[in-house]
Image (cartoon, rainbow, N blue to C red):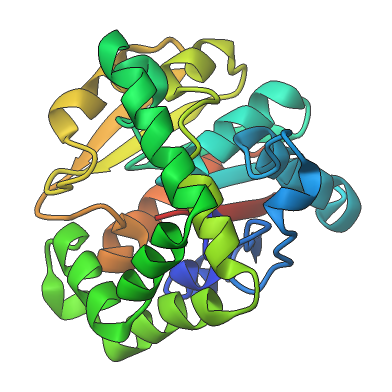
Amino acid sequence: MALCSPYSDHWRKNLPVLGMSNRVYSIDLIGYGYSDKPNPRDFGLTSFYTFETWASQLNDFCLEVVKDEAFFICNSIGGLVGLQAAVTEPQICKGLVLLNISLRMLHIKKQPPLGRPLIKGFQNLLRNTGLGKLFYRTVATPQSIRNILCQCYHDASQVTDELVEKILLPGQEPGAVDVFLEFICYSDGPLPEELLPQVKCPVLVVWGDKDPWEPIELGRAYGDFKSVEDFIVLSDVGHCPQDEAPHLVNPLVESFVERHSATRSSVASESLV
């Protein structure tokens, strides 16, 4: 079983429980957490921090470390990574659990045509001037991280000092600011509605109904895809159900894996805010 989101520590409440009956891995996506952070400028005009890159990382991890098929349990942008991985190497993924998958509302395709040049211009300004690093310094503080988390967690009591520290510390590593600016300026790549029709494995979609970033009114459409076996609503839960309500998420994951496992399975996951 692979847990997929930008930060592996975001699965700290799930690993001990899921690990009792499965082999479970939580992965820092390259550029995030404590993974390597190659400078995106070293790749010229070719974007490095893309869902294709992270999907290759996830599939390679399964081939080289897990050495088996795996279930991908994914949150937020991790859901795009899991979907892309399942489409690229369908023989690896046995099933997907998508927790409040990112709708990618800032994707260039979802913007008015006349506004697209303005968006590209603003992104270039962030990436190529001191404005971007100034912006990063304002958000990479304990209070800013806490404020952001309190927006996306419905139960603000779950936004603890430990959680703030686990999100903040990796962001202070060398190279983190360049990765951050590269990704917030990444408005291309796949959309979930483009990947879901290509997925061959079973998919379970789970949604916290108090998510202010990914509204459930829009998320419900993903329950209509052929590969999606069910759409489950978690009442009074925000954007990161695995951390805010692990007592609800863990049984759903265990049940899904058990249903679709002919043998004892390995599970890999990643988490993205």
Q: Residue 126, relative to residue 124: is it above or below?
A: below
Q: Quadrant of residue 174?
A: bottom right
**In the image, 46: left or right of 6?**
right
Left or right: where does residue 107 sit relative to residue 3?
A: left
Q: Residue at x 46, y 31 (%)?
A: 187
Q: Where is residue 214 in the image (x, y as percent from the top left)?
A: 24, 39
Q: Residue at x 29, y 90 (%)?
A: 161
- The image position of residue 53, as x and y in percent, is 71, 40
Q: Can residue 51 be seen in this snapshot?
A: yes
List the single residue furthest toward the front. 129
Q: Is residue 49 above or below residue 260?
A: below
Residue at 78% in and 26% down: 91
Residue drawn at x 87%, y 50% as measured from the top left = 67
Front residue of 182 and 156: 182
Give 213 or 227, whichever is nearer the viewer: 213
The quarter of the displayed image where residue 250 is located:
bottom left
Name the quadrant of the C terminus: bottom left
Q: Going by the picture, which residue comes out furthest to the bottom?
A: 161
Q: Where is residue 153 in the image (x, y as percent from the top left)?
A: 19, 63
Q: Does residue 264 appear in the picture of this structure? A: no
> Between residues 173 and 268, which one lies in front from this camera angle?
173
Q: How many badges with numbers are in the image?
A: 0
